[in-house]
Amino acid sequence: MTGDGGYRPDPGRLLRPFAVAAAGADDAGLDMLSLVVATRPPADADHLLPEREAALSWCTRPRTIVELAARLQLPIRMAKLLVAGMIADGSMRHCRPSVSGAAVGEDVLRAVLEGLRAL
């Protein structure tokens, strides 16, 4: 409010990053190296939730939570909560690799290293 009774909205971002995820949401046991993939393209209503829209657009192939957090410029905890909500509503799924644990660990470490280099 201004002194003359008029309202002037803040031109900056209206919601802080921690307001992106639903209150009381559970991260569904995801960790920062969990692989997730979108199960659908962004819909018309997703433009109202820009972080969801960006996550759906970018996760057309499996991505780690840490990569997604860096891409969306969100804290990892908020990215985990966002993804958990999207898994719950069917917009994303958690990828469970079918190869041996040693090969998965090496692939994930390479992906994280490439992501860090890209920053």
Image (tube, rainbow, N blue to C red):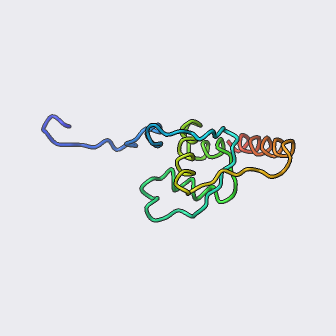
Question: Residue 101 at x, y = what percent?
Answer: 84, 43
Q: Is the N terminus in the top left, top right, bottom left or bottom right quadrant?
A: top left
- Identify the image quadrant of residue 90: bottom right
Query: Which residue is rendered at x = 66% and y = 38% of the image?
Result: 31
Question: Residue 55 at x, y = what percent?
Answer: 57, 53
- Identify the image quadrant of residue 108: top right
Residue 5 or residue 45, whichever sits in front:
45
Q: Is the C terminus in the top left, top right, bottom left or bottom right quadrant?
A: top right
Residue 102 or residue 106, whichever sits in front:
102
Q: Is residue 44 above or below residue 75?
A: below
Q: Is residue 84 left or right of residue 49?
A: right
Q: Is residue 70 left or right of residue 9?
A: right
Residue 18 or residue 72, whichever sits in front:
18
Q: Is residue 67 left or right of residue 21?
A: right
Q: Is residue 25 above or below residue 58?
A: above
Query: Which residue is rendered at x = 49% and y = 40% of the image?
Result: 25
Residue 12 or residue 74, whichever sits in front:
74
- Identify the image quadrant of residue 79: top right
